[in-house]
């Protein structure tokens, strides 16, 4: 190959190490008949290089929108209205357009779909789709790509050759999920976003997938973001945890600390709602009320106040700021007030 | 491969049974036309002074079988003739075998119908993809609406409109026949040019009449596939646009192949109006002529051919799906 025939815009070599990610003031709005409504607003979230961050929230809390924003892939009628997503070695993803954006996806950022979703072309074998992926990203040595894919699949406990020769309908949910993880990693992306990686899988397969996520994360030195509605999943894999409600991150911090001593009333409510294996089933208390939808999120004040046991007057008018206390960040007036009292005393 | 062969064998066996059933039904219907035309004819000939022997032969020529013996015996005779592809003689062209007349007419139907249908399929599918991608824009709306309108116009109205437009208002195309008689039939430019000229109007009608359906079917199919998860997944994996487009196109066109194969079978019989209007000597025109002339042997032959065409089209549609859709293929393997 001569120099001329080389593609001009050689994509920056993917970082060999885990990149850091800084999401700053990110807002995404969806166009509806009632005007543009925010799905997420003012999200600040740092992914520390080499860690697994879990984002938990109910349906409609904006967690999937956040995940898609990391690839600047919010689907119309949604759009990123403000903010930035800085990824080491890539810059601000929100500013990327066209081919630059396409090349970043897959090569720098791997995205793993929910297992229940059909993320593979039903008419082509996994192997052929792998080759399509390689060609899309200008991989010259396709044999090496196939070798790498087989190795990854073998690493996840599957027969690589057989899987590459299979169509989607010949694979079980757990196998599809591992194929999805393989496709996200095979181009050597070091930032991986997993959207509901274990939803719709049976318990044993869930455990296997979580173990694989953790092991692959460590072996390849990744920065990983796991989106889930399942606190158990986060407890299992995540180093850090962010809790989303109504399009805001209401609390974040190291997983053990947040789960061990939740501060935000929503996090506390969530944890109280989980039935225990031992003890009385009545100890589990459902959170009263229902989560807001795109149209019912309050325009001002705290998004959680309708369901909050600690509601104060200020909550109706002023949106609580995210206040950092060491590694813990909480956005709640009541928590602030309690902390202020403590420091005075 | 053996799976496909076994599937094909099953289809053929079922198809054969179907042909037998249809032939039997048409045999029974012809024999039970009110007034028993066969007996009436036979008696009329005797009245005219024919010997019973002569009258019987003449009647046999007319109906394609000897009205002799019990109904069952006649049926067996008719069916044995069928297996040797002997459908009797045509009344309209005395001495001509029904099979020969059928094949002569078939070639004038199959070629224009095939060209017209494939043309409209190709253009309709491409426009359908475009209409789906631009579905929120003006051009997409125009395409979809024009598709609906064309789809709504009956074939024969379209044929009349086109005929009036291109043979009378703007007389640039000939009307009627397959070619000018002044040209020597054979492989020479004049004759072939004239053939094409004469076939243009029928082909145009077939194409326009089905084009609207293809646009609408392809548009809705593409819109469905566009919403599928694997398209977003391919986008998030940074696949090239061209590759994603191929993913969409192949998945969206799948259901249309079945419709295509089926419609090809139907068009054997469906060309009646158009051939009548353009006086094009294909199967449809032949069928009309045989009915007006009470040429029952030819009629029976035409029905048989149309039946076989539709059955074959069904088999082709099913086999085609087995080949192009891996999900159907392996479903068969599991069932084995």
Image (tube, helix red, strand yellow):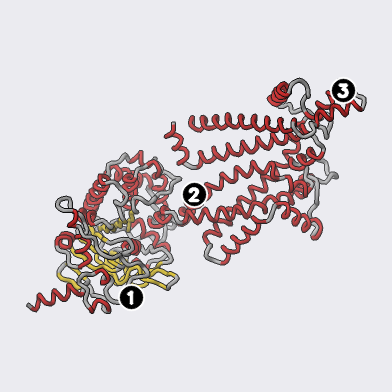
Along the horizontal axis of the image, is A271 left or right of A27?
Answer: left
Residue at the spot 56% in from the left edge and 32% down from the top edge = B11
B105 w.r.t. B56: above or below? below
Q: Earlier in the sequence, mark 3 or mark 2?
A: 3
Report which residue position mark 1 lands on: A299
Residue A327: percent from the left, percent from the top? 16, 67
> Disc 3 versus disc 2: distance between alpha carbons?
64 Å
Residue at the spot 83% in from the left edge and 41% down from the top edge = B184
Report which residue position mark 2 lands on: B251
Q: Chain of mark 2?
A: B
* Mark 2 residue element: helix
* Mark 1 residue element: loop
Q: Chain of mark 3?
A: B
Q: Are marks 1 and 2 on the same chain?
A: no
Residue B216: percent from the left, percent from the top? 58, 55
- Foreground mark, 3 or 2, reads 3
Cβ atoms under marks 3 and 2 closer than 8 Å: no
Q: How many marks?
A: 3
**Res B187 seen here:** no
Other residues around mark 3 within 10 Å, as few (<14) / some (14–19) / many (≥20): some
Report which residue position mark 3 lands on: B54
In which quadrant is the C terminus of chain B drawn? top left
B292 w.r.t. A335: above or below? above
Which labelled disc corresponds to residue A200?
none
Residue at the spot 60% in from the left edge and 51% down from the top edge = B122
Along the horizontal axis of the image, is B222 left or right of A102?
Answer: right
> Disc 1 versus disc 2: distance between alpha carbons?
43 Å
- Foreground mark, 1 or 2, reads 1
The quadrant in which residue B148 appears is bottom right
The quadrant in which residue B146 appears is bottom right
């Amino acid at each position: 190959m001569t120099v001329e025939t080389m593609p001009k815009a050689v994509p920056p070599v993917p970082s060999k190490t885990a990149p850091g990610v800084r999401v700053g003031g990110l807002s995404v709005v969806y166009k509806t008949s009632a005007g543009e409504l925010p799905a997420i607003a003012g999200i600040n979230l740092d992914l520390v290089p080499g860690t697994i961050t879990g984002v938990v929230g109910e349906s409609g809390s904006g967690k999937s929108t956040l995940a898609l924003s990391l690839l600047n892939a919010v689907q119309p009628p949604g759009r990123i209205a403000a903010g930035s997503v800085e990824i080491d070695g890539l810059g601000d993803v929100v500013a990327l357009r066209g081919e630059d954006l396409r090349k970043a996806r897959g090569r720098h950022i791997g995205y793993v779909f929910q297992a229940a979703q059909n993320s593979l072309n039903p008419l082509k074998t996994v192997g052929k789709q792998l080759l399509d992926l390689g060609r899309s990203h200008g991989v010259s040595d396709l044999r090496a790509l196939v070798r790498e894919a087989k190795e990854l699949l073998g690493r996840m406990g599957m027969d690589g050759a057989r899987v590459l020769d299979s169509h989607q309908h010949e694979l079980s949910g757990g196998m599809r999920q591992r194929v999805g993880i393989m496709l996200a990693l095979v181009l050597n992306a070091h930032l991986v976003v997993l959207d509901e990686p274990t939803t719709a899988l049976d318990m044993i397969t869930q455990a296997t997938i979580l173990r694989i996520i953790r092991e692959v994360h460590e072996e390849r030195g990744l920065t990983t973001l796991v989106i889930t509605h399942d606190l158990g999943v986060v407890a299992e894999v995540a180093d850090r945890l962010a809790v989303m409600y109504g399009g805001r991150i209401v609390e974040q911090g190291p997983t053990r600390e947040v789960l061990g001593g939740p501060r935000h009333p929503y996090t506390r409510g969530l944890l109280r709602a989980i039935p225990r294996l031992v003890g009385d089933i009545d100890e589990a208390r459902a959170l009263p009320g229902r989560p807001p939808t795109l149209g019912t999120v309050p325009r001002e004040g705290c998004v959680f106040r309708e369901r909050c046991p600690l509601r104060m007057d200020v909550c109706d008018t002023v949106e609580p700021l995210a206040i950092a206390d060491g590694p813990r960040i909480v956005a709640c007036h009541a928590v602030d007030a309690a902390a202020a009292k403590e420091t005075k005393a | 491969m053996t799976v496909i062969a076994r599937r094909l064998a099953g289809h053929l066996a079922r198809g054969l049974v179907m042909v037998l059933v249809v032939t039997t039904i048409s045999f029974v219907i012809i024999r039970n036309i009110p007034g028993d035309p066969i007996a009436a004819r036979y008696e009329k000939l005797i009245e005219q002074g024919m010997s019973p022997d002569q009258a019987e032969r003449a009647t046999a020529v007319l109906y394609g079988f000897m009205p002799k013996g019990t109904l069952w015996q006649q049926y067996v005779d008719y069916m044995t003739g069928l297996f040797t592809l002997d459908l009797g003689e045509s009344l309209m062209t005395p001495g001509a075998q029904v099979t020969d007349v059928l094949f002569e007419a078939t070639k004038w139907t199959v070629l224009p119908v095939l060209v017209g249908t494939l043309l409209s399929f190709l253009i309709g599918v491409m426009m359908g993809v475009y209409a789906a991608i631009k579905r929120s824009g003006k051009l997409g709306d125009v395409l979809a609406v024009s598709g609906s309108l064309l789809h709504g116009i009956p074939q024969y109205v379209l044929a009349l409109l086109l005929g009036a437009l291109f043979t009378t208002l703007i007389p640039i195309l000939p009307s009627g026949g397959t070619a000018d008689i002044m040209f020597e039939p054979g492989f020479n430019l004049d004759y072939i040019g004239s053939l094409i000229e004469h076939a243009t109007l029928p082909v145009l009608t077939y194409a326009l009449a089905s084009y609207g359906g293809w646009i609408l079917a392809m548009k809705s199919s593409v819109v469905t596939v566009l919403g599928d998860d694997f398209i977003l997944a391919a986008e998030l994996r940074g696949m090239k646009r061209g590759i994603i487009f191929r993913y969409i196109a192949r998945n969206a066109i799948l259901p249309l192949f079945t419709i295509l194969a089926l419609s090809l079978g139907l068009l054997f019989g469906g060309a009646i109006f158009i051939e009548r209007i353009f006086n094009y000597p294909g199967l449809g025109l032949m069928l009309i002529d045989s009915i007006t002339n009470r040429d029952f042997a030819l009629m029976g032959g035409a029905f048989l051919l149309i039946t076989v065409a539709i059955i074959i089209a069904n088999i082709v549609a099913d086999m085609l799906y087995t080949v192009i859709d891996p999900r159907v293929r392996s479903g068969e393997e599991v069932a084995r």
